[in-house]
Every structure is written in structure tokens, then in C-alpha cells.
């Protein structure tokens, strides 16, 4: 389960994708049914500038899930869900989506030779994500309701034998997404982070990430892991920190939000499918699920790009926004190593990036003018 394995003669083996790298901890998938785009193995990158901003002694890292093949964390679960669907003889996959699920489902269905149908809320999908689903050949159906209504409609098809729903209500998705926890611990040299922060929309990702940490800890404890790092981390689990957009925070408020509102379209969800799983992750880890405002999300979104060189879609920045907020409130005491998952690439929503950035400056095509502008 390593992104870089030493071969017999010292050569480094290539990454093989989530199913093959983590086969021992995943549901059974025949080799001839594996559908992969070599997802997973994403980088865990230190954030020195934002660590200083968050608080003295903090060591923040970002798990850049936007470097998966279709640009989001959804690929981890989709490789398992579509592989299992293919193994069962499915003819088509179906999903409701705020964008990233549709892009991932369409790509993996194309790879598997399956039909793909996606149901989206009309006018509420970032252009980059919609373009992906379309170019991969999916049939895209737009409804007048929001994501929650789209998912209700898709759920009604979940009993159709030849059509497999690949939203995170499908447990195979959660199985694939749990692998991120194993990668984080491996990247930290066998150490478990003190906390792991994630954006929370449909809540499948915080549910899956916690599942990975719990399963890993149970196995490590049972096997009596040896060595200093292994001993320290055997049985260890991080606090799970989840962050919802203030205008789309049903878990925080304890009630469904009928008309969720946020610029972070990927987490613009009023009735999360994995609501219970998110509460379990929060409570069992001793963590929290709180809100961040759109302004806080956009502030973290810009800071990630401007001081760390990391470009994510707005919803991704909710995890970082939440950690910065807790740091400013003095609520990170006792924590040192914190991992923030950023879920999708910035090019998923290029219009937002343009809207919050400095305007393009027009200058004369004259070297003296250019020199003056650059050096002023």
C-alpha cells in the first residue's frame, strides 16, 4: 500500500490505483473487473505559511485530492463502486450530483464501457464539472429542484438490478474513500495526525475517512505493531473536524435545510445522505462539526493559492477556513499535526477564481512602459 515501492533490484514500482494498492482492505473485486484511472496516491503537502497563521507550534498539512484523475476525491470511491458494478454485470450507473460525483461517475463509466446518467440541479453546477460529465459521454438530466431533490429521485432507482447508483449511499464508495486515512498515516511516517479537517456536504467523505482511521487502528492494535512510530500510533485516531457552509449547515443546526445557500456549490446540500456517519465520526473521535461563512471560505481559498501555491475549488477550502477560524479562537490547544483534506481542483470552478482575483491589466506594447509597470 505504498505509492513508491522498492522492486527487487531497487527500482521504484509504479502506483497501481486504489483497488490494487489497497485490495486487502476492500471488498472483493475480480482482477478482470477492476476499473481504474490510477487514482489515489495524492500528495500530503506541508503548509508552513498557514501553519504560522493558525497558531504557534501547529504543523498543518493539506491532502490534495484535486490531483486525482478527474480532479476530486470522488475517484477514490468511484473506482470501487464502478468496478463492483461491472463485476455484477451492471449495464449503467446513475448518480445525483453537485458536480464532482457526475464527473467521476462519467469518467469511470466510460472506462468500464457502461452507460452513465447523471441528475443535476439546474443552474447550480460549476461549469468545469458540468463540462467533464458531458465530454465523458454521460447523459445529463437537469431538474428544477436542488441536489437533495435530485438524490431523492435517484434513490428511487436504487433497486433496479441493471442500474447501479454510485452516490455515497452506495457503501462501495465509502470503502474506496476510506483509503485516504491509510495514505495520510503512511505519508506522516506511521504517525496519526492529531486532527483531520474536512469540508462537509453530503458527509460521505468525513464518514469514510473516519472509517479508515478506525479500521487501521483496530488492525494495528490487534497485531501488536512494533517499533517506536508504530507503537505510538497503534490504536491512535485523530479528532475529526468537519465544516459546513453557514448557509448549508443541516448537521450543525440539527434540521434539514430546505433551501441551502452558499458559493461553495460542492457542499450546498440541505439533507446529507451520510448525516449519521458524520455524527458518529464527530462523536467517536471527540471532534466537532461547525460552520464557516462564505467570506471565511473565500479567504482560505485565496490564501491557499497566494501563500501556499495550492489552487482548490471553493468548497475544498472550507476545511482550511475552519482550522484557521479555530486557531484564531484559541481552540486548537493540545493539537500539533493537523491534516486538511482539500477535495477538488480549482479548475473545477474557474469563474470563481476570476471573480475574486485582481483584474488583468492592459499595457502598451512598449518595453519602457513594461519596465516601468514591473518595477514601480
Image (cartoon, helix red, strand yellow):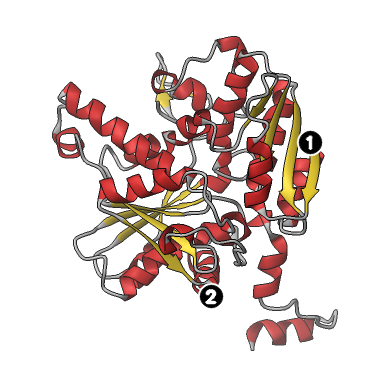
Asked if labels 2 and 1 touch by Cβ distance under 8 angstroms, the answer is: no
Label ID, residue 325: none
Q: Is residue 375 visible?
A: yes
Return the x and y of residue 55 as percentages of the image width and height. 29, 70
Crowd class of label 2 (few under 14; some 14 to 19; many from 20; radius 10 Å)? few
Residue under the point 30% across and 53% down: 195
* Figure check: 298 above or below 128: below
Say which residue label 1 marks.
138
Quarter of the image for residue 10 reads top left
- Disc count in the image? 2
Crowd class of label 1 (few under 14; some 14 to 19; many from 20; radius 10 Å)? many
In the image, 162 versus 211, the foreground residue is 162
Return the x and y of residue 326 as percentages of the image width and height. 33, 69
Q: Which quadrant would the C terminus be assigned to in this image? A: bottom right
Residue under the point 53% across and 24% down: 16
Quarter of the image for residue 323 reads bottom left
Label ID, residue 295: 2
Q: Which quadrant would the N terminus be assigned to in this image? A: top left
Residue under the point 15% across and 24% down: 224
Label 1 element class: loop
Q: Classify residue 286 as left or right of residue 3.
A: left
* Figure check: 32 above or below 297: above
Q: Is residue 238 visible?
A: no
Per the model, the C-alpha gap separating discs 1 and 2 is 34 Å
Looking at the image, tell me whether mark 1 or mark 2 is earlier in sequence order: 1
Return the x and y of residue 62 as percentages of the image width and height. 43, 53
Return the x and y of residue 67 as percentages of the image width and height. 57, 44
In the image, 193 versus 293, the foreground residue is 293
Label 2 element class: helix
Q: Classify residue 340 as left or right of residue 355.
A: left
In the image, 359 versus 328, the foreground residue is 328
* Figure check: 70 above or below 324: above
Amino acid at each position: 500500500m505504498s505509492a513508491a515501492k522498492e522492486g527487487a533490484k531497487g527500482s521504484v514500482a509504479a502506483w497501481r490505483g486504489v483497488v490494487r494498492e489497497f485490495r486487502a482492505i476492500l471488498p472483493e473485486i475480480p482482477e478482470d473487473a477492476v476499473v481504474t484511472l490510477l487514482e489515489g496516491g495524492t500528495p500530503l503537502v506541508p503548509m508552513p505559511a498557514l501553519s504560522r497563521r493558525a497558531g504557534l507550534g501547529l504543523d498543518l498539512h493539506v491532502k490534495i485530492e484535486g490531483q486525482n484523475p478527474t480532479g476530486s476525491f470522488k475517484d477514490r470511491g468511484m473506482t470501487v463502486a464502478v468496478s463492483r458494478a461491472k463485476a455484477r454485470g451492471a449495464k449503467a450507473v446513475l448518480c445525483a450530483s453537485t458536480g464532482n460525483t457526475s464527473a467521476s461517475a462519467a469518467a469511470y463509466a466510460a472506462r468500464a464501457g457502461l452507460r452513465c446518467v447523471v441528475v443535476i440541479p439546474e443552474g447550480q453546477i460549476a461549469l468545469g464539472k458540468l463540462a467533464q460529465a458531458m465530454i465523458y459521454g454521460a447523459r445529463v438530466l437537469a431538474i428544477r429542484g436542488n441536489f437533495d431533490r435530485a438524490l431523492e429521485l435517484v434513490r428511487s432507482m436504487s433497486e433496479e438490478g441493471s442500474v447501479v447508483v454510485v452516490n455515497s449511499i452506495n457503501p462501495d464508495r465509502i470503502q474506496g474513500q476510506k483509503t485516504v486515512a491509510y495514505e495520510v498515516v503512511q505519508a506522516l511516517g506511521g504517525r496519526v495526525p492529531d486532527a483531520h479537517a474536512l469540508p462537509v456536504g453530503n458527509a460521505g467523505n468525513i464518514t469514510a475517512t473516519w472509517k479508515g482511521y478506525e479500521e487501521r487502528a483496530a488492525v494495528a492494535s490487534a497485531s501488536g505493531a512494533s517499533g517506536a512510530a508504530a507503537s505510538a500510533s497503534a490504536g491512535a485516531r485523530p479528532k475529526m473536524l468537519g465544516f459546513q457552509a453557514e448557509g448549508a449547515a443541516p448537521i450543525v443546526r440539527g434540521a434539514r435545510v430546505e433551501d441551502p445557500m452558499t458559493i461553495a456549490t460542492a457542499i450546498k446540500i440541505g439533507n446529507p445522505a451520510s448525516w449519521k456517519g458524520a455524527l458518529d465520526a464527530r462523536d467517536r473521535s471527540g471532534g466537532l462539526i461547525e460552520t464557516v461563512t462564505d467570506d471565511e471560505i473565500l479567504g482560505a481559498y485565496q490564501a491557499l493559492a497566494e501563500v501556499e501555491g495550492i489552487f482548490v475549488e471553493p468548497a475544498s477550502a472550507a476545511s482550511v477556513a475552519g482550522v484557521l477560524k479555530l486557531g484564531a479562537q484559541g481552540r486548537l490547544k493540545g493539537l500539533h499535526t493537523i491534516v486538511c483534506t482539500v477535495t477538488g481542483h480549482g479548475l473545477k470552478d474557474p469563474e470563481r477564481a476570476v471573480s475574486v482575483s485582481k483584474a488583468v491589466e492592459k499595457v502598451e506594447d512598449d518595453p519602457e512602459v513594461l519596465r516601468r509597470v514591473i518595477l514601480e
